[in-house]
Each structure stands twice: as structure tokens, then as C-alpha cells.
Amino acid sequence: MHILLIHQAFVTPSEGGGTRHFEMCRYLVHMGHRVTVITGEVNYLTGEKRNVSEEVMEGIQIYYIKVYRSIHRSIFHRALSFLSFAANSFFKGLRVDKVDLVWGTSPPLFQGIIGLWISKLRRLPYVFEVRDLWLDFARELGVVTNSFVYYSFKFLEKMIYKGATAIITNSPGFVPHIKKVVPQKEVHIFPNGVDMMDFAKLDKQKSLEFRARFGLENKFVVLYAGNIGIANDIETILEAARLLRKKAPDIIFVLMGGGLKIEEYRAKCQEEWLSNVKFLPAQPKKVMPQIIFSADVCLATLKDIPLFNTTYPNKVFDYMAASRPIVLAIDGAIREVVEKAKCGIPVPPGDPSKLAEAVWGYYNQPSLIELHGKSGREYVGKHFNREKISREFSDFLFSLAEQDNRG
């Protein structure tokens, strides 16, 4: 099959950010499919412009199309970037030859509707992937306050759900919310996970080299890796760092990534003299397994709103694969995974004292770090292996194509 993926935030291993779709596409190519990706010329996490207009990487044909570049300047500018990608990806998608199936993904919803239009105009099956409940999250966070805007997007969301040949999602927590919109449609789960081959060669010497490179020698490193934006509750991490600053000066909180609020948080740390917090730029995904392995403890946090109980954050699975223990300040679906895997300490979202207490617990119990790390690696390899998930996804796409041909 020739699969066309429309995805503005598509990331390759040479860039910073989550590589779920690259890894799945790579496996699809290995299984004999042809995969074409249309993505933006600006990296979604870092805001940096990519230097090529197209490339073939591990058999995946990737087109980088022009978008409005100031993606992290404000919510308004981010919307302009989304709209510019939607317009340009539409015309590019119509020109890609001999496509058998269109795969769209959200957020944002704009690219979801573009995938739907392309599939309808070309009379192709359309798989729509829900990666988070973008619109409802935005409303809960106070980003979308205008009722007209909210219900206009809800109408758009329902149009995409109803028009898609099939709906897939990366978290079981999203299924009830999708079914509220389209109760008659089945929702298929292909969860987040990890490519265990990327985590096969973790080296202690390279860990020491990474620590030396960033001045982290002889430190107890607490790593947060990922987006630094509105939803990620970085405020709780900074407050936990403040609570531990004098108690254990050798505990260093490392925030690695980029996003809409990184400069605000950096300024806050300077104003409050939080010398035990270090900001590092997003690193290429191909080196992230080793970087995660270099930490002592890893963090996953989100704002304390009920809807975030539905999520399966990518970073948690990467932490587990790198055999690092997790302090998890997210309830719900991902907490169930961490508890079943026995690979971390869940704490209430938005509670800096509990987060600091969990870090302090690991600091004083090196044996617990090893125990939780080993348990997490074993569990994620068994239950969230990207290769297995991708093979199941390939079988699913074949079944859709067969249904479409019969129809």
C-alpha cells in the first residue's frame, strides 16, 4: 500500500521531539508499504527551520512544506502556523501520486480536516488518529474561552470523526470521549510505546560524558524531557526544586526541551535564584535514550485537570525503556501503567511537596532506583513494543483497504 500521512509535527531521529510516527512509518516500510509524509518546514518542539524541502529517510518520503514560522511566539501565532500548514498540505496532498490510504492525525484539528478533504476528493479510505483531546484540553486550561470558537471547533471535530473511514487513538483513556461524539463508531487503540532497539546499547561511560558536557558531574539528576508549555505544569517542578534547594544542593532538576513558555520559566528561575534548575535545549531523538539513561530519576507532569487523566505521554515509555524510575504527577491511564509496571512513584498532580518528597525518597534509596528502573524496562518491552504495535497497525490498514475494495 501507499500510505500518505499528514502531520505537521512529524519528527525524525535527528531532531528533538517524539518520534512515534517516524518509528511506525519505518516499520511500515520494512513490511513492504510505501509511506509519504507531508510535514512542516519548522520543527514543532524547537521552532527551528529545517534546511531541506524533501528527503528520503529509511525509505520514508518526507516533504517539508512552507509554514508560518513563529510557532512559539503566542497562541495567535501558533494558530497562524497551523492554518498555513493546513492550506499548503492540502495542495501538496492532492499531487502525491498513486496513494491508497490517507492517514491524518490531531492535534491540531486543521490538519485532520485537510486529510479528510484529500481522502474524499481522491476517493480513498481515511484513518484519523486522535493523539490528544486538543480542543477540550485547551478549554480546561483557559486557552479557548470563547463559546463560539469552542463549538465551531466541536462541529469540525464531529465532521472529521463522522467522515473518517476509521478512528484510531494512542490512549485507551480517549475512547469514552470520542464515543460521546460518534457513539456508533468503533475506536481502535494503537498505544504509544517504544522501539526497544533504540534502547539496546545504553553505556555508563557515555552517561558520564553527557554529565561532564553539561556540568552535571557528581549531581543527582532529575530529568524532565519534552514540551515546556501551558499544559505541562512546569511550575510544580520549579517549586519542588525550591523546596529541595537547601536540603540537598546536589539534586539538580534538568528541564530539556522547548515550547511556548520556556523563556518565562527561565526568567522565573533567574529571579528566584533557583540554581538547582538547569534548562537544556531539545536534543536529537537518536541520542535521547542515552541522555535519559544518564539521569537518576525522570519526571512526567501535567496540570491538575481531570481530562489529563486520559493521556499516555510518550516520555513515560521512553523513561521506562531507559530503565529510569519515574516520579509521575499525572493521574488516570498512565498512572495505571506505572503502578502495574512498579516502575515509579505516583504523586498528586500539582503538589510540589509530594513531588519533592518522591525525589527525596529516591535520593536516599539507590536500590529503589535500580529496582524500579529494571521493572519498568521489562514491562514496557513486553506490553508497549513499537514493532509489535506497528505490525498490528499494518494488519489493520490492510483490512481497511480490503473493506474499501469490497465496497
Image (spheres, rainbow, N blue to C red):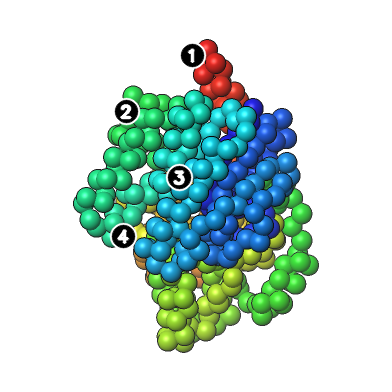
Q: Answer yes or no: do the residues labelled 4 and 1 have beta carbons within 8 Å?
A: no
Q: Nearer the viewer, residue 99 or 147?
A: 99
Image point 43% across, 69% down: which residue?
A: 73
The secondary structure type at the circle numbered 2 is loop
Q: Earlier in the sequence, mark 2 or mark 3?
A: 3
Crowd band around label 3 with a 10 angstrom C-alpha radius: few (<14), some (14–19), many (20+): many
Q: CA gap, disc 3 to disc 4?
A: 20 Å
Give the percent coordinates (x, y) of residue 112: 44, 41
Residue on which the image places disc 3: 111
The residue at which mark 2 appears reads as: 183
* Residue hosting label 4: 143
Query: How far, Cα to Cα, is label 2 from label 3?
Result: 23 Å
Image spot of residue 398 (x, y percent): 59, 23
Q: Nearer the viewer, mark 4 or mark 1?
A: 1
Camera-nearest label, 3 or 4: 3
Q: Mark 2: few, some, or many residues within 10 Å (few <14, many ≥20)?
A: few
State which tag comes first along the sequence, 1 or 2. Answer: 2
Q: Earlier in the sequence, mark 4 or mark 2?
A: 4
- Disc nearest the viewer among 2 and 3: 3
Q: Looking at the image, which residue is at 75% across and 72% down? A: 209
Mark 1 lies on a secondary structure that is: loop
- Between residue 379 and residue 394, name the one nearer to us: 394
Instruction: Tell me, yes or no, if residue 342 can be seen here.
Output: no
**What is the distance, in whole Å, between disc 1 and disc 2 at their CAs?**
23 Å
- Whether residues under marks 3 and 4 lie with C-beta atoms below 8 angstroms apart, the answer is no
Q: What amino acid type should be assigned to the residue bearing mark 2?
A: Pro
The residue where tag 1 is placed is 407
**276 in relation to 334, above or below:** below
- Which x, y percent locates residue 382? 63, 39
Q: Nearer the viewer, mark 4 or mark 2?
A: 4
**Separation of disc 4 and disc 2 at Cα?**
27 Å
How far from the left and from the top, in percent, is residue 352?
39, 69
